[in-house]
Structures are given as structure tokens and as C-alpha cells.
Image (tube, rainbow, N blue to C red):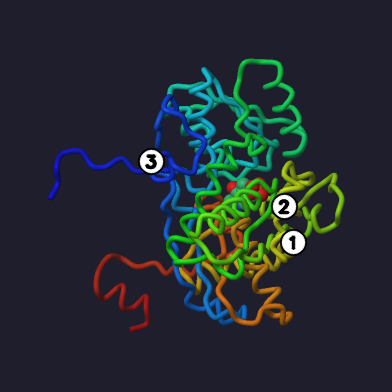
Amino acid sequence: MSTGAPQPRGLLYRWASVLPLTERTPRITLGEGDTPLVRSAAIEKLCGLDELWFKLESCNPTGSFKDRGMVVAVARAIEGGARALMCASTGNTSASAAAYAAKCGLECFVLVPGGKVAAGKMAQAVAYGSHIIEVEGNFDDALNAARALTAKHPVALVNSVNPDRIQGQKTAAYEICESLGDAPDILAIPVGNAGNITAYWKGFLECAETARASLHPKMFGFQAAGAAPLVAGQPVAEPQTIATAIRIGKPASWAGATGARDESGGRIDAVTDDEILEAYRLLAGKEGLFVEPASAASVAGLLKVGRAGGIRGGRAVAILTGNGLKDPDTATSQYTPKITKAVASVESVERALGW
Ligand SMILES: *Cc1c(COP(=O)(O)O)cnc(C)c1O
């Protein structure tokens, strides 16, 4: 029976006990976290898995997992007296920072690589009212500038070099262990700046330490072939890929990513843009999941490793990091829509369908 106001939801309520919060941390929320875990219909067989589950991080309030880290980073910044936020972004960090800034009455400054941010993400940064600075150069250049600016001015840096971001993002690993009753055998995730793979590994380690899980997953990170510094073992000066969210040549959490790989017995591989787009089309066409290209990298990687005989059954979770609606240009370039015209009558539609 209802007794008035609904219970507040969101990360700072649900996972308070595992986050670095104090009594003075404001419990802000846009309803982030608690995202669905959905079983694969078709792709799991193609990968040689017994079970494949998709964690729909695209269901967060701004359409990507960045909200998990951002809610913690922004709450802690407010607690520390911040009135303004800054980030460098390939698009989703800026959308998320701008949304929480709007909700909390903060100013938000976003540095984006000119011409390389998907249209939907730019629309979000504009709609939430952030100050947008398009910089010449790529994400790595923008992050360098943001670090220097926030060291000089009283503005909180909310990129994943901020440890509160990692703390917030680790909660997805807790949710997976809770939903499955244990950690999966494999965790597949796209890797750009490498904050998220670092956060998941931290979360899974904590789950094992606190008996929420009996095992650690092998961490399978996937970079785009044109932006694969962790695979090459050295930074990439001019990263290129259709998956703009992971178009990063010098990941800030480099050691976190290689540590997760090595400690878990996992791997970090590259997938080509063609492989990413194949997974993108399979996810939409066979699973009903419309994701942005970067998110499809996790599934492209599982398909690649599976087809090469590198997977022998077991249970995997693939992180679908962001919503396909964010990048409508990639969607329209991938398909030739089959659209038939008719007037709105039974006869006309029947004729159009050839019935
Ligand atoms: C940020 C982002 C990534 C990459 O995450 P990192 O923490 O930078 O490795 C992948 N996919 C989407 C949709 C993103 O927004």
C-alpha cells in the first residue's frame, strides 16, 4: 500500500554503503543506475557462449553509463563547495555533466574535439545549457587543457581521472553480481579513456571480498583498431574510428586497464570499424538493442574471440555503454530504409504491401 511520496531511487541511495559519501554529501539523483540485464536471443550462440547478457547502460538518464560516475563526482564537488564543473569529452561525459549541473544549479564548461562529437550528444549539451568550447585537436588534447584549466581556476574536473567517477561506475559490477547471483565468467567492455574497465574491475574485486561473488570475471576490453593504444603498447597520435566515444589515443587510466587485464587473466584486443558495425547491426536487428557504435565494440570483440575459438562456453556480460539515438548519422549511413508510400486507407496500405 502506498504511503505518500515514492521512495527516492538512484545510486547515492541504493549504493551509499559502498560509496565515499559523508552525511554532508547531497543525495542528488536523476534516477541513474539499476539498469536492465537482458539475455541474448541470437548472438550468444555465435560467440560460443552458454549465456550472454547485455547490461543496458544506455538506460541511464542521459543515455550512457557516464551518469553513474557523474552523480558521485558532482555530489562530492558540491560538498566541497564547487559552483562550476568542467570536462573534456567525446560527447557522453559532457551530456552527463551538463545534466547534473542543470539539476544542481551549477555552471558547466565542456571541451569537445571540433566536428567529432555525435549529433545527439551535442544536442544534449546544448539543451542542458552548458558552455561548449570546441577545441582544435582530439580528445587527448582537450583533456590536457581541461586538467590545466581546473588546476588554475576554481572549477571541478569531472573526467574519469576524478576518482569519484570510478567509484560511481563500479556500482554496475555490484548490480551484475546481484542480478546473476554471482560474477560472470567474462566481462566484455569497450575501452576508450579506460576509466570504465578500471571501475568494473574495482567493483568485481570488492564483490568477491564481500562475498557478493565467488569468482572474478576475466576482463575482456575492446578498442577500435584505429584507436588501440593499449593493444599497441604505446599512445596513438591520430586516433581514428567511427566509434567516436572511444576515439582516444592516450587513455588516462592506462594502468587501470592493463592491471584489470593482467590480474583477471583477460585480454585487451582491437576490433575494426567493420567488425563494430557488424555487431551494431546484429544488436539492432537480432536483439532489438539500438546502441551507439562504441557500445557495439564489446559485442564485436566477443564475436571475434568466439569465432577464433577463444571462448568455450560459460557466461558473459557485455556492457552496452550508450544509446543508438545519440548517433543518428551512423544509423542513417548504415541502412537504406525500405519505405513504401500509401494513403491512409485499408486498400491503399494493402496494395503497398502487396497483400
Ligand atoms: C565513455 C564511453 C566509452 C569508453 O569508456 P572509458 O571509460 O572512456 O573507457 C565507451 N562507450 C561509450 C558510449 C562511452 O560514452
Label 2 residue near ligand 1, CB within 8 Å: yes
Residue 264 in sight from this viewpoint: yes
Residue 72 on image: x %, y % = 50, 36
Q: Quadrant of residue 137?
A: top right
Mark 3 element type: helix
Between 43 and 27, the one nearer to me in the picture: 27
Cβ–Cβ under 8 Å for marks 2 and 1: yes
Quadrant, the C terminus: bottom left
Mark 2 element type: helix
Mark 1 element type: strand
Q: Earlier in the sequence, mark 2 or mark 1?
A: 2
Can you tell which mark lies on residue 257? 2
Q: Amino acid at mark 2?
A: Ala
Residue 204 position (above or below residue 116): below
Residue 350 on image: x %, y % = 31, 78
Q: Residues within 10 Å of mark 1 (few under 14, many from 20)?
A: many
Residue behind mark 3: 13
Q: Quick check: 59 left or right of 217? A: left
